[in-house]
Image (cartoon, rainbow, N blue to C red):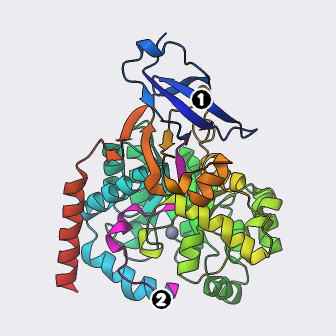
Amino acid sequence: MPFDTLIHNATLLTCNNTFDILHGGWVGVSGGKIQALGTGPAPGRAEVREPIDARGGILMPGLVNTHTHLPMTLFRGLADDLPLNAWLEDHIFPAERAVITPESVRWGTLLACAEMALSGTTTCCDGYFFEDSVAEAVEAFGLRAMLGQGVIDHPAPGVPDPTGNLTAARRFCQRWRERAKTIRASVFCHSPTTCSMETLVGAKRLCEEFGLLFQIHAAETRWENEHLRTTRGASPVRLLEHAGVLDERTLLAHCVWVDADDIAVIAGRRAKVSHNPESNMKLGSGVAPVVEMHAAGITIGLGTDGCASNNDVDLFQAMDMTAKLHKVVNLDPTVLSAETVIRMATIDGARALGLDGEIGSIEIGKQADLIVIDTRKPHLTPIHHPASAVVYAAKGSDVQMVMVAGRLLVKDRRVATIDLEEVMDQVALIRRAFKNRA
Ligand SMILES: [Zn+2]
């Protein structure tokens, strides 16, 4: 049986259990899934309508961004070089009140999708407001996503009365849990300091009712850690444990301020962690103890966080940064090898979202969420080790082809599913409107 699509002439970085790398490899895709893979001449190549020649490039699973706020592309570079609380309260929250509407969320999300796809991300895990608009935009673009309606005990865009925050989240989950194959609903609680115990428990119950992932920012800053220890007598992680929200379907974004006791709790509950080194560095939050969390057996995926604190959603940059950051803070170049970091950005990220049975590696039966890195570049020549090239030398802009569930989203570095020029024009208009109001 000929494949719908055949990608050949590639170095396959499978990211499977044994991290197999196949030179001169090919992958056959039909019905949106990986049907076969191998090396040498691909079977039935002559019958495939449009075989994709990777030109000797690296073919790997699409990257998984485990923590982001897609519409925040609108605030890229709006307020830099500030501590988290001042950044959030004096700049981001007022900006959200001024310009966040279902319409602006749509354009900001489409921009984020284009940026992610063009830098090799095929799945993201998002939490924001007007999440319906986020979901519609992500679906229109064609990326795979875990999307959570934001829950916070403050007036928020689309939820002016916080007593309605869980009702809004419920409505989103009901609407999106089975609507699109590539979209999964989730609930995103803002943090243990901005959500009451009652809200946290209610949100987790909602997740349990529908079988969904519960996401929350946790232990991000020293202030949060000290504030909760002083006022509530517990660390952020302990507080979440007391609330009963920590289990294998919980994703904790950041975990910078966690001690050995917190790490043992996270590991014991089998909760997952999203590591966002660039956001933590830029906001001066600190360095998450990734090496210690790995040693405790915790699944850790990589994230970019929102564009306002990074200021991009490029996971290639995040991989490079992750590998180097932990070497320097541990004064040990052997920690977080290129292979480990690629796993974090692929299969471990998928596992953190509960999607490792479907995505995160190139294996027969998995979804055809694939990217090709063009290695005919000076900075990628020569390649002694493909994993090293991916983490330490490749850029997001080297991604040549992107497919999700067998559908081409990027071909020859061009976005195939939306009019990107229009999106950039619309975002520029939003920025102008925002400037006028400010
Ligand atoms: Zn975040």
Binning the other alpha carbons within 10 Å of mark 2 as few (below 14), some (14 to 19) or many (20 upward) gives: some
Circle 1: element type: strand
* Dot 1 or dot 2, earlier in sequence: 1
Q: Amino acid at mark 1?
A: Gly
The image quadrant that residue 92 belongs to is: bottom left
Number of the label disc, if any, that sits on residue 25: 1
Percent position of residue 280, x then y: 58, 76
* Highlighted magenta segment, given as a residue range: 59-84
Q: Read off the residue under disc 2.
A: 82
Circle 2: element type: loop
Cβ(mark 2) to ligand 1 < 8 Å? no
Quadrant of image for the C terminus: bottom left
Is 357 placed left or right of 266 in the picture? left
Percent position of residue 262, x then y: 77, 71
The image quadrant that residue 91 belongs to is: bottom left
State whether residue 308 is above or below residue 368: below
Name the residue: 36% across, 49% down. Answer: 138
Is 67 placed left or right of 116 in the picture? right
State whether residue 200 is above or below residue 30: below
